[in-house]
Image (cartoon, rainbow, N blue to C red):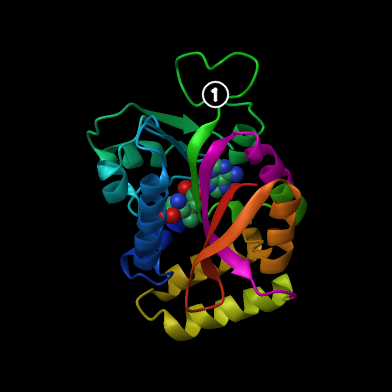
Amino acid sequence: MDFFERQWSSYRAIVEHDLMEHRAVAAATAATIDDWLARRAATAPAPSMVDLGCGDLALLAPLLQRLPLAHYTGLDLAAVVLPLAQAALGTVPYPTHWLEGDLQAWAQGDLDERDDGGSGEQPRRTDILHSAFAIHHLDADAKATFLQAARQRISPGGLFIWVDVFREPGESRDTYIARYVNRINAGWPQLSSAQKEHVTSHLRSFDIPADRDAVVAAAQNTGWNWHWGWQGGHQAEALAVLTPA
Ligand SMILES: C[S@@+](CC[C@H](N)C(=O)[O-])C[C@H]1O[C@@H](n2cnc3c(N)ncnc32)[C@H](O)[C@@H]1O
């Protein structure tokens, strides 16, 4: 197994054993989108959706299969997951597009998520933006840049669901990492020692969860309203609901 396959297979084990509360995340995501759909005018056109860091869609496929979408784009930095996502989704009654790329590039408008040419000079906007467990790889400045750019890519009245790990207000990254590693070692017996090692080394190398208060302020400063839609039981996983202010 190469580096990515090892990391990915450890992540799959985490999802299967629900160690990061993916089942609750999926339920909260479905409830948030259903509520947003119910509040739309009956005459509103079917919404488009973009999923940044879509992975293999193990979490989201059942929801996507029933949503009345006009279009879905799954974007991921790792090309290898896109056929898995496509297979998990199966046949749906709306067009889908699979894009290998960086979520920052998408936000900046450097990637056009559809094949039909875009709308001209302005990057296309999406009605529903979703990202789960991908943005925490960006540092605080890059997150603020992302939020500012993504604000230009959301439709008026649109919905951005950001699922991720977050630090407690004022908590240092080192304290967060130590806390999370303790949680893995003490509470994840379903993983082998090798899998725990893959996860902790990934965490130490790549994870930069946002400080909760700081990221809410960054979002508000870049034109978003912020609402916590779901909180996990470990002061880490959470779902934020962002709407254009
Ligand atoms: C932990 S997985 C989560 C997958 C899926 N969203 C889920 O919730 O199960 C993170 C995914 O985000 C992708 N990713 C990480 N950084 C990214 C970036 N800068 N741009 C696009 N995708 C990224 C990874 O390749 C991976 O597939």
The answer to which quarter of the image holds residue 96 is: top left
Check mark 1 vs ligand 1: CB closer than 8 Å? yes or no. no
The image shows residue 145 at horizontal and vertical percentages of 73, 44
Magenta range: 145-170
Q: Is residue 91 left or right of residue 170?
A: left
Q: Is residue 191 left or right of residue 53?
A: left
Q: Tell me which residue sits at (48%, 36%) in the image.
A: 127
In magenta segment, residue 159: yes
Disc 1: CA contacts within 10 A as few (<14), some (14-19) or many (>=20): some
Helix, strand or loop status at disc 1? loop
Residue picked out by circle 1: 112
The residue closer to the viewer here, 48 or 190, is: 48
Q: Tell me which residue sits at (38%, 73%) in the image.
A: 191
The image shows residue 206 at horizontal and vertical percentages of 63, 58
Badge count: 1
The image shows residue 95 at horizontal and vertical percentages of 33, 26
Q: Is residue 4 above or below residue 152?
A: below
The amino acid type, in three-letter code, at marker 1 is Asp
The residue closer to the viewer here, 217 or 79, is: 217
The image shows residue 120 at horizontal and vertical percentages of 60, 13
In magenta segment, residue 74: no
Q: Is residue 196 above or below residue 66?
A: below
Q: Is residue 165 above or below residue 123?
A: below
**In this view of the protein, can residue 100 be seen by the observer?**
yes
Q: Is residue 193 left or right of residue 64?
A: right
**In this view of the protein, can residue 88 be seen by the observer?**
no
Specify the farthest residue to the bottom: 186
Q: Is residue 37 left or right of residue 163?
A: left
The answer to which quarter of the image holds residue 101 is: top right
Q: Tell me which residue sits at (65%, 40%) in the image.
A: 151
